[in-house]
Image (cartoon, grey):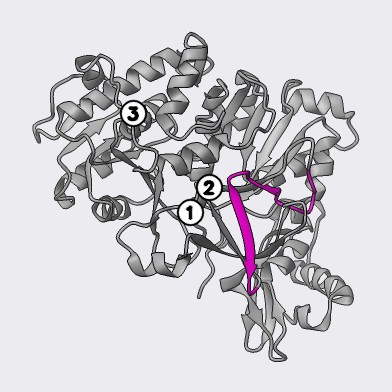
Amino acid sequence: MICTTIREILTRTEEKYGSEDAVRYKAGKNEIVSRTYTQLKEDSEAFSRTLESLGQKGNHVAVIGKTSYEWLTAYFGTVNSGSVAVPLDVSLPADEVCELINRADVTVLVADDCRRDVQEMAEKVCPKLKDIISMQKEQVGRRESDKVLSFSGLLEENRGSFQEMPDPDQLCTIMFTSGTTGKSKGVMLTHRNMAENATCLDMKIPEKTVLLSVLPIHHAYCLSMDILKGMSLGAVVCINDSLMRVAKNIKLFQPEMILMVPLMIETLARKLEDASLIPPAIVKAKVFGKQLHTICSGGAYLNPDYIDLFKRYGITILQGYGMTECAPVISNNVSWNMKKESVGQLLPNCRAKTVDGELWVKGSSVMQGYYKMPDETKETLSDGWLKTGDLGYVDEEGFVFLTGRKKNLIITKNGENVSPEELENKLGESRLVQEVLVRECDGVIEAEIFPSEEYVKKKHIKDIKSALQKLIDDYNQSAPLHKRIYRLKVREQEFEKTTSRKIKRQQ
């Protein structure tokens, strides 16, 4: 059923699954703690009442920390009170976090104590900030600064129901993009944007599915799919506490479904390829558990060959596509109707057209605009249409196909257009290539490659540059003249990346 507010998602699910587990997380090494949907609703309403008691209802509330029950409680409590949540990247330096707090006009900061540095700096350099709430602080009282409050203490002080229903078209979340170029922008999303995006497509996911949440919670993809969509289905959201412990946590929580970015899938694929001589059923039971049946992929290009590889192990990969500005999902493959080369069919609430090769989309998920950035908003939105910046097309069945990014397009001396992503994806199929960036340099196409040290050692490769040059020569043999690579640069270290692990392109 389609919901138009985030509060509607939580209240409907609580009515149906109140005593069932909503969230599971680790308390010790192997101890699992669970919270029910009723507890989540009651705790989030206590936080709504907290904002009201502080005189902060309707204001902007920043939340920073790793995925946790407290983070979810603060988020639901904020948006369901008619206030605006500002999820912040837990891995950013303190000065950058404080800059975003100021840019977003934040008056309340809810922070995990792993970012005490942010709490301390924000007190000094964020003049609009009135209250800081620590997720871990036990006592109810404030510190000497009289600004830092206890999250758990405030919830206990403000127990009770909170009945206000937000307007579907009011602002509920400002999410900062982590673009590969330029200044991050605050994407303004309404309740309708986020709630309809999460609930408009029936993916036939069984109710009460157990899923493992491994992506950063401040990312729109994780918040929409893992949390909002998952909870709309009464799913059990299991919190992965570290990327270093994904394998252990799969065994501990036994998820049936995981949301991943292609980089994670590629890492798993290499392990599966190395174990190709072992019967698939044994490998699956050992690596994923017998119960895992679906991996959803988004955020970057996924080699379609991996879909076939994982299918051998009884796991379906469903690739999707989106961007924060569209709350974020634009298209998704579903298990009974997919095209491997496509990033899926347009969501029911979304339509698309191609303008000069660029994909434009329109629908109830498209953002209001960028917070306090009217010029950038005007550049990106045109009569309700969102200019995605992606080159691609939609076929007659509504499946989306992407070829690259408009801003990265290489125009050769002969006037030919080349998408560097197409060439990067081709070279990236080799196990020798860990990371690659293709660009124009001095009038020719250059590939800069960071080789896989693990593969080099495994195959005892002595002359790495010659091996990479052979890879490029093999590619060039079948490539059209205007898509041939004429220069190779070998890197000794990884490329600089955004917090979402995308390579930063120098403009």
Q: Which residues are magenta?
A: 338-356
x and y percent of residue 50 in the render? 21, 25
* Mark 2–mark 1 CB contact (< 8 Å): yes
Q: Which mark is residue 328?
A: 2
Query: How many marks are shown on the rendered structure?
Result: 3
Picture quadrant where residue 505 is located = bottom right
Which secondary structure, mark 3?
Answer: loop
> 22 and 229: which one is in front?
229
Crowding around mark 3 (Cα neighbors within 10 Å: few <14, some 14 to 19, many 20+) is few
Say which quarter of the image contains residue 123.
top left
Q: Is residue 24 left or right of residue 106?
A: right
Q: Is residue 352 magenta?
A: yes
Label 1 belongs to which residue?
325
Q: Looking at the rendering, in which quadrant would you find the N terminus? A: top right
Residue in the image at 53% along x and 26% along y: 232
The amino acid marked with disc number 3 is Met
User: Mark 3, mark 2: which one is toward the viewer?
Assistant: 3
- In the structure shown, which secondary structural element does the residue marked by tag 2 occupy? loop
- Residue 352 appears at what percent x and percent y? 62, 58
**Circle 3 is placed at which residue position?**
165
> Which kind of residue does numbered mark 2 sit on?
Pro
